[in-house]
């Protein structure tokens, strides 16, 4: 089964936002939490990125690329990059995968690949 990260679609105006906010960013009228839960798109454009070299000891990699991606619906999300030479503006495609694990838990997140 393909995994997703979910966003919140305003039942009044249809605007999709991520992450969760109690009030719709578009119509400012959603005081009653009336959102449908919809999967975020996974394709987008790399806005910016950085490489991390000093990670906590439980990471299984030595360095980590981290990027901010503007998805097809305009929402922005932070994710790991599995890309050799990232370029700002390049098209990327995400998958929801395990990004970190400890003794008892696995933590899921978006990992982006070249599109
Ligand atoms: Zn709205």
Image: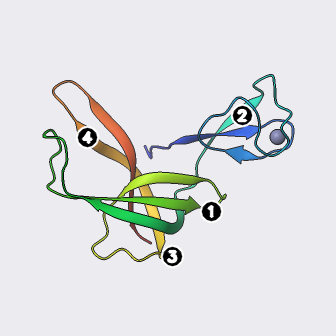
Looking at the rendered structure, the secondary structure element under dot 3 is loop
Give the x, y percent position of residue 18. Answer: 61, 43
- Could you say where residue 51 lies in the image, as x and y percent from the top left? 28, 62
| Residue placed under numbered mark 2 in the picture | 36
The residue wearing badge 3 is 89
Task: Identify the mark at residue 24; answer none if there is no mark.
Answer: none
Q: Quadrant of residue 34?
A: top right
Q: Is residue 32 left or right of residue 88?
A: right
Disc 4/disc 2 C-alpha distance (Å): 29 Å
| Residue at the (44%, 72%) spot, across then down | 115
Q: Cβ–Cβ below 8 Å for labels 3 and 1?
A: no
User: Which residue is the site of mark 1?
Assistant: 72
3 or 4: tag closer to the N-terminus? 3
Please, is residue 66 above or below residue 58 in the view? below
Mark 2 secondary-structure assignment: strand
Mark 3 against mark 4, which lies toward the viewer?
3
Cα–Cα span, label 3 and label 2? 30 Å
Which residue lies under the disc numbered 4? 100
Q: Nearer the viewer, mark 3 or mark 2?
A: 3
- Asked whether 108 or 57 is in front, the reply is 57
On screen, residue 101 versus residue 8, left or right, reads: left
Q: Residues within 10 Å of mark 2 (few under 14, many from 20)?
A: some
SS class, disc 4: strand
> What whole-number distance in Å separates the C-alpha atoms at marks 4 and 1?
26 Å
The residue under the point 13% across, 40% down is 57
- The quarter in which the N terminus is drawn is top left
Give the colour scheme shown. Answer: rainbow
Separation of marks 1 and 2 at Cα, in angstroms:
18 Å
Q: CA distance from mark 3 to mark 4?
A: 27 Å
């Amino acid at each position: 089964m393909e995994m997703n990260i979910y966003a919140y679609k305003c039942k009044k105006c249809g605007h999709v936002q991520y992450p969760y906010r109690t009030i719709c960013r578009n119509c400012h009228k959603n005081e009653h939490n009336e959102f449908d839960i919809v999967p975020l798109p996974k394709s987008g454009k790399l806005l910016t990125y950085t490489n991390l070299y000093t990670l906590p000891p439980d990471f299984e990699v030595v360095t980590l690329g981290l990027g901010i991606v503007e998805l097809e619906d305009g929402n922005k999300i932070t994710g790991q990059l599995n890309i050799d030479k990232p370029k700002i503006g390049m098209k990327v495609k995400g998958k929801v995968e395990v990004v970190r694990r400890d003794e008892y838990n696995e933590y899921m997140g978006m990992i982006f690949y070249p599109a």
